[in-house]
């Protein structure tokens, strides 16, 4: 996507009047369905990351990308309890198993979830 095709950051006002701004130039974004996606690095000098995630996901009209302040896919999934995108998050299966082990009411045996994420 060229700079001229890159949409402006949008805002959305909810029923209470609270205004939400779309995620800016960040590596990880979340969709309204609570799925975390990774954006590819951009060659453009003004932006660090492409607008759409690596998988090409587009949002329905009126939806905004949420900003996920994380340095790695593991931190994005486990730190925010988000489902990893199976197309743009490389270790999505392992991360989803860890997430379910920590955040689900069901106990998953042999998930090998690192101690740093266990609660």
Image (cartoon, rainbow, N blue to C red):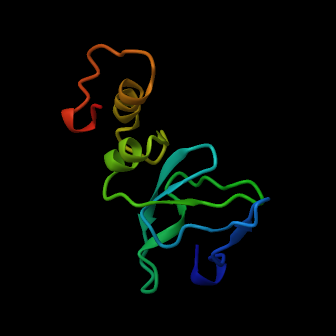
> Residue reaching furthest left?
115
Classify residue 103 by image quadrant.
top left
Seen in the picture, residue 115 relative to 7 is either above or below; the reply is: above
* Image position of 85 (left or right of 2): left
Seen in the picture, residue 58 relative to 97 is either above or below; the reply is: below
* Image position of 60 (left or right of 4): right
Classify residue 3 by image quadrant.
bottom right
Could you tell me how many numbered marks the image carries?
0
List x then y, in percent, for residue 10.
Answer: 68, 72
Q: Residue at x 42, y 27 (%)?
A: 100
* Image position of 45 (left or right of 63): left
Image quadrant for the N terminus? bottom right
> Residue reaching furthest front?
16
List x then y, in percent, for residue 74.
Answer: 32, 45
Q: Residue at x 43, y 46 (%)?
A: 80
Relative depth, front residue between 98 and 18: 18
Seen in the picture, residue 90 relative to 49 is either above or below; the reply is: above
Relative depth, front residue between 69 and 13: 13
Q: Residue at x 61, y 52 (%)?
A: 57
List x then y, in percent, for residue 63.
Answer: 71, 58
Q: Residue at x 59, y 51 (%)?
A: 31
Image quadrant for the C terminus? top left
Classify residue 116 by image quadrant.
top left
Seen in the picture, residue 80 relative to 19 is either above or below; the reply is: above
């Amino acid at each position: 996507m060229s700079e001229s095709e890159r949409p402006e950051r949008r805002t959305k006002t909810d029923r209470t009047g609270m205004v939400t701004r779309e995620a800016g130039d960040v590596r990880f974004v979340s969709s309204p369905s609570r799925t975390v996606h990774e954006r590819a690095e951009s060659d453009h000098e003004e932006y660090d990351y492409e607008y759409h995630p690596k998988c090409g996901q587009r949002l329905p009209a009126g939806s905004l990308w949420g900003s996920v302040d994380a340095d790695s896919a593991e931190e994005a999934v486990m730190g925010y309890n988000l489902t990893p995108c199976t197309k743009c998050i490389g270790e999505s299966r392992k991360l989803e198993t860890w997430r379910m082990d920590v955040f689900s009411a069901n106990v998953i045996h042999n998930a090998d979830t690192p101690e740093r994420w266990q609660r």
